[in-house]
Image (cartoon, grey):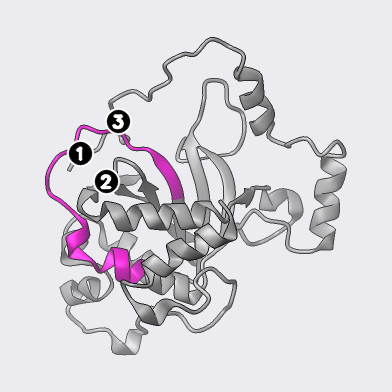
Amino acid sequence: MNKLHILSLISLLFTINPALAEDPFGLDNDDDVFASDSTIETNSKENKSALISSFLSNRISESSAKNIKKAEKVFCYTVDYASAGYEGYTIHNLALKGSCGELSPAGRTLIKNSVFENNSLYSNSKDNCNISPKIILRYIHGADYTDVLFSSPCQSLTFFHDGDITTINAAPGAAIIDLIVKAYSGLSEPYQSPALLGQMVANGQALNQRDKEVLRKMAPSEAPIKKWDTKRNNQQSAPTVNKQPARSGWNKLRQ
């Protein structure tokens, strides 16, 4: 996806809230866009409604919502179903394809306003489609975190926290979900383990020249460390096999 296409997608997103047009995907460290403790009402129900829609507040746990509300960092990852024998990095048993960076304050506000606070995005109805994983947003608060998986098509959000998995049907908000998925997927870069680079942040990208040198020494041939692309290319000549994920488990959309 070229930069012009990404910009056109973002301009459409900003029709939801024009105030978000500045630096939606940068790495600025401005003030947290979520309300501070001093501005939150004492009623716990109102606390959750101030952050997320009433539809979501009745379906995800208070602790899961807390991580989103008080997140100190929000990282973005691109994901897909892992093929048989896949040995690369995974997240929630999905293949971790890349990193789309850290959300800027404006980017976090865009997601909050257009997704988490938008009741019209969701449906109570059941859908027989299989989840198609595209991006995961990881909201980190201290040592705890909540992951939010965006699926497109079969538009939905799946919240992961402390072993709890909740999938929400977002078919009415298909246009918004699709635009967000396309915009952030277009920013994806190859993911590298922060542990290998000695980093304390989990964005999975080389942050300085030292990190780049570490990666260069690990892969002098410039071949993918995880053999992701290589494995996919080798399989192109093999007979086509239906690898649709099983229509059961958390990836079967259920309310």
Q: Residue at x 31, y 72 (%)?
A: 16
Residue marked by disc 1: 254
Considering the numbered disc 3 on the image, is that residue within a helix, a strand or a loop? loop
Looking at the image, do the residues carrying marks 1 and 2 touch, with CB atoms under 8 Å apart?
Answer: yes
Which quadrant: the C terminus?
Answer: top left
Say which amino acid is labelled 3: Gly
For disc 1, the neighbor class at 10 Å (few under 14, some 14 to 19, many from 20) is some
Report the span colored magenta. 111-135
Q: Residue at x 62, y 14 (%)?
A: 237
Q: Taking the image as drawn, is residue 156 in sight?
A: yes
Residue marked by disc 3: 249
Considering the numbered disc 1 on the image, is that residue within a helix, a strand or a loop? loop
* 23 is higher (above) or lower (below) than 205: below
Say which amino acid is labelled 1: Arg
Q: Earlier in the sequence, mark 3 or mark 1?
A: 3
Residue that lies at the very extreme toward the top in this rendered image: 239
**Mark pair 2, 3: CA separation:** 11 Å
Q: Position of residue 185 (x, y in %)?
A: 51, 51
Q: Which mark is residue 167?
A: 2
Q: Position of residue 132 (x, y in %)?
A: 37, 38
Considering the numbered disc 2 on the image, is that residue within a helix, a strand or a loop? strand
**Mark pair 1, 2: CA separation:** 7 Å
**Mark pair 3, 1: CA separation:** 10 Å
Residue that lies at the very extreme toward the bottom in this rendered image: 38
